Structure formats: structure tokens, C-alpha cells
Image (cartoon, rainbow, N blue to C red):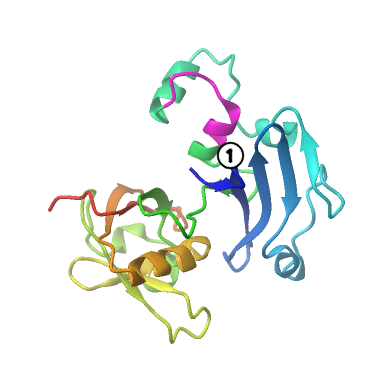
């Protein structure tokens, strides 16, 4: 759980559809009220063609007694007949829009937004699920034939290798298979936090939990990252 002065918060990520680079553009906070503001890489994203959310046209802190409709509308309707199965999938016992947003990211097929639960500097126990980035640029599939992915399986443990000499991002963390094959990278929005934790010598596990070979190269390998390690060979 991420907190800011005793308030929980999530980051809003926008992925540039051309370069596939992730930008942290907003911060959603839950305390006595809900608040939203632009932050972090907001200006960099604008230079790449991103525009402000229509519901938040100004650079200020917006406040609401309920989760902003522009975000709650990205979630399954609580009146759906199968809502209990959806909640069970995410480990929830009752409908809580904010908790569901934290679990499923509020992702939709019509845009490239996603909410993420950040890792804070004082977190010593971490569990996050995310997709490995950059696979389409490294695997011989070239974004067209996912059957050519390196031979990995659900349950495989992957290795992390910091890349301080990376020309594009000195905080880059390379993800390798257990045979040493370069698979991809940790998402940019988790780089610095994970680097800081690894520098403390904490044990970790990065385990494959989902493989999708149906052609979506941005979301073909999903992992569960844990500190301390909970995986068993």
C-alpha cells in the first residue's frame, strides 16, 4: 500500500503509442477525499504529443468526495451479474472502486492509460505484477511471431541485471531468462525503486505468471516481483 502523508495514492501512466515509452503523468490520492493532480513526467509527455485529460484541463489539485467519474468509468459496473467473480479474481470481498482500480489498473483497449501502485523508498516488503517491457525489440519475433519468444514457461524464475551504462536510461534493469537470454526490461516507473532495494542486498524473486503468445507484444510476459523472495525453484 502506497501512502503520502497517511494517504494512499496511485500513479497514472500514459504510454506513448508510437515509442511505447511510459510516462508518469498524474497522481490519484485517497484520503478523506479523492485528489488528482498532474506530476512527474507530465511536461515530457506533452512534448511527445500527450494532451491533458479533458476532465482535468488545468494544472491544479482537483478534489472530490467520490472517485472521479472519469476513473470509475474505467472499472467493471458493480451491477454486473458476474461482479462477484471479478472481485474474487482480484482478491476483493466487496466492491471498492479505488481498490479495484489499484488491482486492475483501469486499463481499456481504447487508450494507453494505466494506474500503477508505486514502490516507495521505505517499502521493505514488495509484491507487484507487471508486464516485461521491450520484448518486441529483442525477440526474433519482431512484433509479429510470438512463437519465437525465448523458451520460457509459467513458473520460471527470471534474473535482473542493472544496466547503468544504458544510453537511453541509466536506471534500466535488464530481465534475463534463467539461461541468461535477454528477455526485456523492468517498466521505467519501477526502475529507481527496485534499484534502491536491490542495492540494499535484499533477496528478490521475479517469476513468470502469464505468457500470451497471441500477438500482443507489449503484454506477452507477465511477472510477479517480490521482495523478499518468496519463490521456490
Q: Describe residue 10's horizontal placement relative to residue 82 as left or right.
A: right
Q: Which residue is mark 1?
A: 106
Q: Describe residue 199's horizontal placement relative to residue 71 as left or right.
A: left
Residue at 40%, 60% in the rendered image: 132
In this view, the residue farthest toward the front is: 5
Q: Measured from the top left, where is residue 33 in percent x and y?
A: 71, 33
Is residue 160 visible from the viewing direction of this image?
A: yes
Residue at 63%, 59% in the rendered image: 24
Q: Is residue 144 above or below residue 65?
A: below
Q: Is residue 97 magenta?
A: yes
Q: Describe residue 40's horizontal placement relative to residue 62 as left or right.
A: left
- The one nearer the camera, 201 or 43, is 201
Q: Measured from the top left, where is residue 23 in percent x and y?
A: 62, 62
Residue at 39%, 28% in the rendered image: 91
Q: Is residue 152 magenta?
A: no
Is residue 113 visible from the viewing direction of this image?
A: no
- Under circle 1, the secondary element is loop
> Splitting the image into 4 quarters, where does residue 186 fall?
bottom left
Provide the residue span drawn in magenta: 92-101
Label 1, residues with CA under 10 Å away: few <14, some 14-19, many ≥20 = many
Amino acid at each position: 500500500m502506497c501512502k503520502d502523508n497517511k494517504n494512499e495514492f496511485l500513479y497514472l501512466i500514459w504510454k506513448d503509442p508510437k515509442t511505447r515509452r511510459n510516462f508518469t503523468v498524474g497522481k490519484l490520492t485517497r484520503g478523506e477525499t479523492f485528489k488528482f493532480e498532474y506530476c512527474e513526467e507530465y511536461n515530457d509527455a506533452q512534448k511527445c504529443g500527450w494532451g491533458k485529460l479533458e476532465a482535468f484541463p488545468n494544472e491544479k489539485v482537483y478534489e472530490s468526495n467520490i472517485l472521479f467519474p472519469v476513473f470509475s468509468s474505467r472499472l467493471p459496473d458493480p451491477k454486473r451479474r458476474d461482479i462477484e467473480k471479478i472481485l474474487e479474481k482480484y482478491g476483493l470481498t466487496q466492491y471498492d472502486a479505488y481498490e479495484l482500480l489499484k488491482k486492475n489498473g483501469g486499463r481499456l483497449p481504447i487508450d494507453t492509460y494505466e494506474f500503477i501502485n508505486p514502490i516507495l523508498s521505505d517499502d521493505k516488503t514488495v509484491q507487484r505484477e507487471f508486464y516485461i517491457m521491450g520484448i518486441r525489440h529483442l525477440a526474433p519475433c519482431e512484433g509479429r511471431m510470438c512463437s519465437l519468444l525465448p523458451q520460457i514457461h509459467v513458473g520460471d524464475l527470471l534474473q535482473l541485471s542493472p544496466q547503468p551504462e544504458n544510453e537511453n536510461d541509466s536506471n534500466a534493469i535488464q530481465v534475463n531468462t534463467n539461461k541468461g537470454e535477454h528477455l526485456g526490461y523492468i517498466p521505467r516507473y519501477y526502475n529507481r525503486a527496485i534499484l534502491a532495494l536491490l542495492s540494499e542486498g535484499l533477496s528478490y524473486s521475479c517469476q513468470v505468471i502469464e505468457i500470451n503468445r497471441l500477438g500482443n507484444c507489449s503484454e506477452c510476459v507477465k511477472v510477479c516481483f517480490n521482495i523478499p523472495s518468496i519463490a521456490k525453484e
